Image (cartoon, coloured by chain):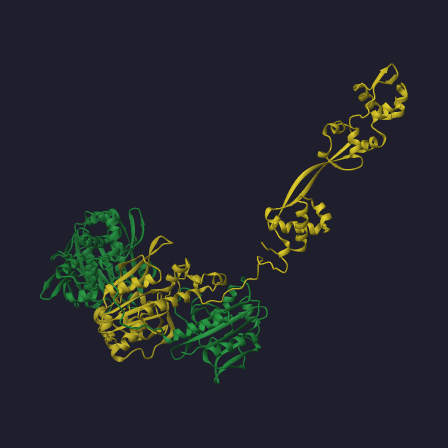
Amino acid sequence: MSQVFHEIEKKIIISLKDNPKQTPEILEKSTKLLPDQIRRGIEWLKLKDLAIVNESKTSIISLGKNGIESFQKGLPERRLLNLLKDGPRNLSDLQKELGPVFGPAMGLARKNNWVEASSEQISLKNSPSELPGEKTLKQIGEKKLQQDKIDKSDLSGLLKRPDFIIEDIVKTKEISLTDSAKSIDLSDSFGAIDVEAKVPEVFVARTHPLKDTIDEIREIFVTLGFSEINGNMTQSSFWNFDALFTPQDHPARELQDTFYLDGISAKKIATPEQIRKVSESHKKNWRYHWDINEARKMVLRTHTTCVTIKYLAENKPDESRVFSLGRVFRNEKVSYKHLVEFNQIEGVVVGKDANLRNLMGIQREFYKRIGITKIKFWPTFFPYTEPSLQTMVYNERLGKWVELFGMGIFRPEVTKPLGITKPVLAWGGGIERIAMLKYGIDDVREFYNNNLGWLRSARKCQ
Amino acid sequence: MPVVELSYTRLQKLIGKVTKKQISDSLPFLGLDIESEDKDLIRIEYSPNRPDYSTDFGIALGLQGLLRIKTGAIKLNIKKSNKYSISVKSDVSKIRPFVTGIIAKNGRIDDKTIKQFMTMQEDLHFGIGRKRKKSSIGIHDLDVISFPLVYRTTNRNHKFIPLNSKKELSISEILKNTDVGKNYGSILGNSPQVPLILDAKQNTISFPPIINAAVTTVTTKTKNLFVEVTGINKEDAEDMLSVVATILQSAGFTLESVQISGAKNSSPKLEQKKMSVNPSLINQILGLNLNTSKIISSLKKSRLDALTKGKNIICTIPAYRFDIFGPMDLVEEVALGYGIQNLEPTLSPSQTVGQKHPNSVNLQLISSIMTGLSYMESLNSSLTSKQILYDNTKRDSSKIISVLDSKSIEHTILRDSLLPGLIDSLAKNIHESYPQKLFEIGTIFNKTSSVTEETHLCAVSSHKDANFSEIKSILQSVIQSIFGKTCETKTTTHPTFKKGHVANIVVDGKVIGIIGEISKSIKDNFKLREPIVSFEVKLPG
C-alpha cells in the first residue's frame, strides 16, 4: 500500500516500529517533536486506522513529609534502636531525644520484641539489619515511582502511617501501531499525493429531465413511423372546441376549466366552408344556437388535438401517421397532482386499416419502449372519439393501476364536416405522468421548480 | 367527471345473482372508474354522457347486461291515462317554453333511494341540463296535487311556501335570499314574468327552474310521484324525462302518461328509435371478424335490441340512450358488449417513414450547445404572474396578455420574455452553490392584433465574478453555432439591466435580443446578491 504521510506521521511511525509501545512523553524524546505535533500526528494516524491509543490509569507513589524525614534520618524505630546500641537508656531521656515519634517507635519496637522495658529502663533485645519499610523508603527516596514497581508487602506498613506515602492516580496513554501500519513501507511514498482526499465539487450541465423524457418519446414516435407536426399554444375556440364537436355550452368550455385570453379574438378562424359545416353539425346534433363570436375567442389550447385536427382538415390525407407534442393548459388549482400547464403527446393514424385493435397495438408497443409492460385497456368517454378507451398501467412503486393515455377513433361528427373521410385513430396523454414514473417523483411541480439540488443530482442515464 | 356513491348490497339486490367481486371486476368495463371503496360503499366516476349511470338503478341495468343476467333494451311501460294533464299558456314561450312530465305510481322509497334520486337530479341539472339553463326537473308527491295543472307565468310578487322553508316567500325574495335563487336566478334574466306550475286549486307546485313548493316534498312515506321537466327546447326536456322515467321504472314504479298541450307543447312519446348499422363497419373499426349473431348478442349485452335486415343490423335504442348519435356509437356498444378485455392488440407494420419537425431538431441541438457551455437547462411556465414578469423586473407592461379567471395567482399572465422566469429560478436557488448558470428555450407571446408566438433562448450566469465580458463570450459562441454568423452588441438601455452594462444583440443589422448585467435594484427585488449577467435572443423558426 502506498499512502501519503506528513513528516510528523512518518517520524511517529518510524519510532513506533523500533519501540512498539510508547507514551506521548517517550515519543517526544524519541522523535524530537513538540508535544503538540505528537498530539496531532497521533490523531491523524488514529483517523487513518494506523495507530491505536490505549489509555490506562497508574498509581504513582512518592514520599510524604514524614516519609522524607524518615528517608533522611531513618525510620523512628531505627533511630530508637540506634540510641539503644550502647546500652539501656532511661525512658524519659529517649522521649526527649526522639520527640513526638517516640510513641509510635516504642510501640513498634515492643510489639516486634526488638526492645525490653523494665521500670524506667529500656534496653535493646534484638536489632534486625533491615526493618520493614526501610527497603521501600530507600527505593522511593525523592523519586516518583509506579506502584507496581514496589514490593507490595513492604509498602503496606508505610501506607498505614500518616504522611509517609503519597499516592497519585495518573492517566497514561500508550501508543502502538495497528497491523496495517506495521506493513507500511515509508520508502515508496516519495512524491505521491493523497489520492483519497476530498476535492471541490463540479456539477454537470444537463438538459432538463422532463425534456429528456419528451425527447425520448419523440424518438419513439419517429421510430414507429410518425412525423411530427407543430402548432400554436394560443388557438381559437373553433379549433380547440368547435371543430372537435364540443358544444358551445359544454361545461369544459367554461372559464373555470379553460384559459381565455382577455380581450383577444381571432379574426380569421377557418374557411367559410369549414365554419358552415362545423356549425351545422353542432346545430343538428346538439340543438342550440351556434355563435361564431364564441368560436373566435382565443384560448390557451386545452389539448394538442387542435393541432392534429387542423392538420387533418388542411391536408385530408388518405394515409398518415403524425404526432404533435407540446404544452397544454387547464385552469386548475395547482397541486402535487395538477399543473395549469403541462406537456401532451398526441398521435394519429389515418388509413383504411386504422382500427381499434391496431390502436391498442400501437399503445402496447409505445409503452413497451418506455419500459412499461403491464397494461390494460378500459372503456371511457371523450367528446370527440367513439369508441374511446383509456390505458391503465401498473405502477410497481405505488402498487396500483394508474390511468395513462386516452385513445379513440374520431367521431364522424368531427371528421365529416372537415372533409376527412378515412377513420382517424387518435391517442394521447400527459408526458409529466410518464416522467414521474421514470424519475420516481410524486409531486409534478418538481419539474418546473428548477431546483438545482435536484437537477445537479438527478440521474441522467437510465 | 361526476361521481355516484353506491352500496354493494343494494346493487346485488337490484342486479340479481351476482358476487361483490363480479361487480367490482365488471364496473370498469362499463366505462365506470372505481374512485374509492370502503367496505360496502363504493364511489364510482361515470361519464357525463351517461346520466343513467347517476343512480345505482341505472348502473344495475348496465351490469345485468354485461353479466348476461338480463340483456336487451329496456322498454318503458307507460300506461295511457287521461287523469293527468298540463295545459301550457303562451306567455311562457318567451321565458321557458316547454314542459313535459310523467306519473310514477306504487313505488317504495327509502332514505337510500331518495339519496340516489337526488344525485340523479343534480347530475341531470348540471350535465345535460347545463346548470338548469337548458332543462330542469322537479319531482313531487303526486297525492297532494290536484290535476289539471297549468304552466304559465306570474309576476315576481307571487308568493308560495318553497321547499325547505316554513313561510311564504315572494318570487323576488326567493331569488334574492335563497341559495338556489342566487345560483340559478340569472337564467330568468330581468324578465318581470317568471314561469310557474299551478294545480287545479291554484296551489303553486313548482317555480322552474329554481325550486319546488314545500307542499309536494317527497319523503319515505311518498308512494306516487309526479315528475315535470321544463326547458328551452322540447327534445332536451324529453331526453331528461326519459332518463328519469327509466330510472323510476327500474326502481319499481309503474308509469302513467301526462297529457301536455298548448303553446307548441305536446305529450312526450319517449319512443325507442331505430338505427341501422353495417356489420362491415363494425368489423372494420374494431379490427374483428364477428358474425351478425355475435354482433347482435354484444349489442344486447349493452342493453340495446338488434335484428338483421338484409346486410344490415337494425338497432332499437331506448329513448334514454340519446348519447347514441349514429352508427359509430353502435360500434362502441358492440365493443363494450363484446368486452374490451377480449380485444387483442395487434401491431400492423408502419407504411410510413417518421421524422421529427425541423424546429424540434434545431432546438434539441441548441440545448446541447448550451449544456456544452456548462449551462443547466431550466423549465418555467408560460403562464406567470405580473409580479415576476413586470413588477420585479420593471419591464414595460403595456402589451400585457392576461387570462380570465385563473384559479392560481401565480399563473395569470402569458410571458413575453424568458428572462424574468430565469431570474426567479436563481432566486429559488440562493442556498445552492455558485456559480449558477441556467438557460431556457421556450415560447414567448406577443400581443399584436391577436397573439403571435416566438421561440426564445435565454441564459443567465450568476457568481461573484460574473461580468459582461463573460456573457458576451458565451453569446458570441452561441450565435456562431446557431446562425453561423458573428454578432455585434450595441449600447442601449433597459430597465432590468445596469446602466452602461447593457446592449442590443445585432445579427445582420437586425436586433434579435438583449445582453447585459442585471441591475442591483432588480436583484434586490428578487432578494439576490451575487452579480447576474444574461442574454435573451429570438431563435429562427
Q: Quadrant for the C terminus of chain A, please.
A: bottom left
The residue lying toward the viewer, choosing from B192 and B373, is B373
Is B420 situated left or right of B3 in this image? right
Q: Colour of chain B?
A: green
Q: Which chain is yellow?
A: A
Residue found at x 34% / y 77% = A266
Q: Residue furthest top?
A: A119
Residue projecting furthest to the left: B310
**Percent position (x, y) of residue B446?**
42, 77
Judge whether residue A342 can be spotted in this image. Answer: no
Above or below, comparing residue A105 to residue B235 in the picture:
above
Q: Quadrant of the N terminus of chain A?
A: bottom right
Residue at figure coordinates x 60%, y 55% from the top left: A3
Q: Nearer the viewer, residue B172 or B241?
A: B241
* The one of A80 and A274 positioned closer to us in this rendering: A80
Residue located 34% across and 63% down the image: A369
Residue A101 appears at what percent x and percent y?
Answer: 84, 26
The one nearer the camera, B402 or A226, is: A226
Q: Position of residue A198 (x, y in %)?
A: 57, 58
Give the quadrant of residue A322: bottom left
Direction from residue B255 to residue B345 in the image, left or right: right
Query: In the image, is residue B30 above or below residue A426?
Result: above
Q: Is residue B478 left or right of residue A436?
A: right
- Residue B246 at x, y = what percent? 18, 56
The vertical placement of B344 against B384, above or below, is above
Inspect this view and state whether residue B163 appears. Answer: yes
Image quadrant where residue A109 sits: top right
Number of labelled discs?
Answer: 0
